[in-house]
Every structure is written in structure tokens, then in C-alpha cells.
Image (cartoon, rainbow, N blue to C red):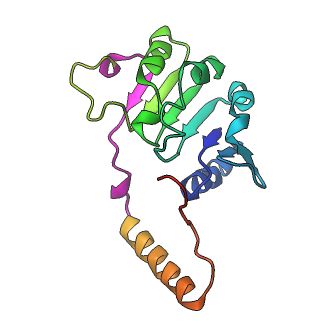
Amino acid sequence: MLIVGAGDVGQQLARRISACDATPIMVARSARDGVHSISELPALLPGADVVVLIVPKTSATIGMVDADFLARMRDGALLVNAARGPVVETGALLAELQSGRLRAALDVVEPEPLPSDHPLWKAPNLLLTPHIAGSVLGFGDRVAALIAGQLGRFGSGEPLINVVDGEY
């Protein structure tokens, strides 16, 4: 499984799929220990059975998954977009789904909301789900614990975790 986005959500996904004997391959803007650089994606895509997108919507990620990206994916591979709709070029994905070469699971789309007559509603090889991750059981408690931890770090002069910098 190629996980594009190596933040907390990507790390949590990698941990969980490792427990199921899947091999996570992490990709982020820049390489670091155990994480490949986004520039390595073209070489990594053909080897992945599943590609999961967990990236923010930035000028660098809008349209990142275009016809060329999709063409590099292996036949029968699954694209999962849990990022933002504009990360994937809808027309290019629709062409791959209709050809039967790729499969996809999307909880975000472009445009959003998806018009009732949009061709994605009838696309083969597609699982379309609502974007409702914030309603996960225990989410509020986890956020409260994160905030309390950050305040404690800040108060004691320790480095913060999950720091967001750059364009978001």
C-alpha cells in the first residue's frame, strides 16, 4: 500500500495495515527516514496494489493525480482518496474507471457536492462514501488529549508535535 501523506493520519494507517501483513510505503513532500519523497512517486506507483491519498489541498497537490499518475498505476490497482477532491482530476479518474483498468474508493470528490447527474454516480469499479471522518467514535476525546498535550509542551518549552507549516 502506497500512502501519499506521511502525517499523523498516514502514520496511523501504516500502523494499522502493518498489523494485517500489508506493507506500507510512505510518501511525503520530502524524504526522511522511512519516508520517500514525492519526486519518487512515478517509480513507486507501478508496484502498488493500493494508493491512498492523505494530503492537504495546496497548490502542489491540486491535480496531482492526473492521467499520467493514473497511467503509472498497475492494472487492477485501487485508488483511495481520503484527502481532498481537487487532488484528483475527476475526468482522468472517470476514464480509468470506465475502462475497467483501475478501481477507486472516494469519500471526497470534485466537484463537491457531486451533482445528481454527474457520471461518477454510475461509474463502474467505484465505491463512493460520504466524507464524515469527524464523526468517528472517540474523536472529541482524542482532540482534547492532543490539545492538552500541546499546551503542556508549549508551557514547558518542549517542541510541539504535528506542526503545520507552509501552504495549508
Residue 78: percent from the left, percent from the top? 55, 28
Quadrant that contains the N terminus: top right
Q: How many marks?
A: 0
Residue 12 included in the magenta stretch of the image: no
Residue 161: percent from the left, percent from the top? 58, 71
- At 67% from the left and 44% from the top, the residue drawn is 27
Question: Quadrant location of residue 7?
Answer: bottom right
Question: Quadrant location of residue 69?
Answer: top right
Residues drawn in magenta: 120-138
In the picture as drawn, the residue positioned furthest to the left comes out as: 116
Residue 93: percent from the left, percent from the top? 47, 21
Vertical side of 152 occupied by 112: above or below: above
Can residue 30 be seen by looking at this rendering?
Answer: yes
In the picture as drawn, the residue positioned furthest to the right comes out as: 33
Vertical side of 74 occupied by 87: above or below: below
- The one nearer the camera, 162 or 136, is 162
Question: Quadrant location of residue 153?
Answer: bottom right
In the picture as drawn, the residue positioned furthest to the top comes out as: 99
Can residue 106 be seen by looking at this rendering?
Answer: no
- At 68% from the left and 30% from the top, the residue drawn is 48
- At 33% from the left and 49% from the top, the residue drawn is 132
- The one nearer the camera, 76 or 38, is 38
- The one nearer the camera, 71 or 15, is 71
